[in-house]
Amino acid sequence: MITVEPIRAPKDLEAVKRLLKNRPRDLMLLVMGTNKGLLTGDRLTRKAG
């Protein structure tokens, strides 16, 4: 089983953003997810209808 921990330190978040600078879609998903404060499950769940 893989354990996933949130990115807590601002310097770590900035490092991930730098890694994603050439992948705009992934960077946008990271920024939107961190700014909205949604849980991963909330971002992955699709509602029918």
Image: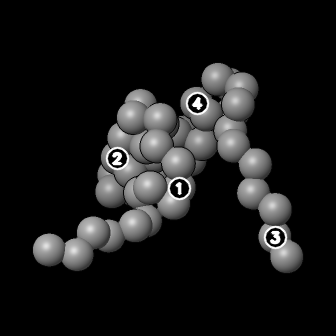
Q: Position of residue 49 (x, y in %)?
A: 14, 74
Q: What is the secondary structure assignment of the residue under circle 3?
A: loop
The amino acid pointed to by label 2 is: Met
Q: Neighbour class for label 2 at 10 Å: few (<14), some, many (≥20)?
A: some
Looking at marks 3 and 1 on the same chain, the residue that comes earlier in the sequence is marked by 3
Looking at marks 4 and 3 on the same chain, the residue that comes earlier in the sequence is marked by 3
Picture quadrant of residue 1: bottom right
Q: What is the secondary structure assignment of the residue under circle 1?
A: helix
Q: Which one is nearer the viewer's eye here, 23 or 30? A: 30
Q: What is the secondary structure assignment of the residue under circle 2?
A: helix
Measuring 59% from the left and 42% from the top, which residue is drawn there? 16
Q: Neighbour class for label 4 at 10 Å: few (<14), some, many (≥20)?
A: few
Q: On the image, numbered disc 1 is attached to which residue?
A: 40
Looking at marks 2 and 1 on the same chain, the residue that comes earlier in the sequence is marked by 2
Query: In this rendering, which labeled residue sits more in front, label 4 or label 1?
Result: 1
Judge left or right: residue 24 versus residue 3: left
Q: Going by the picture, which residue comes out furthest to the front?
A: 49
The amino acid pointed to by label 3 is: Ile
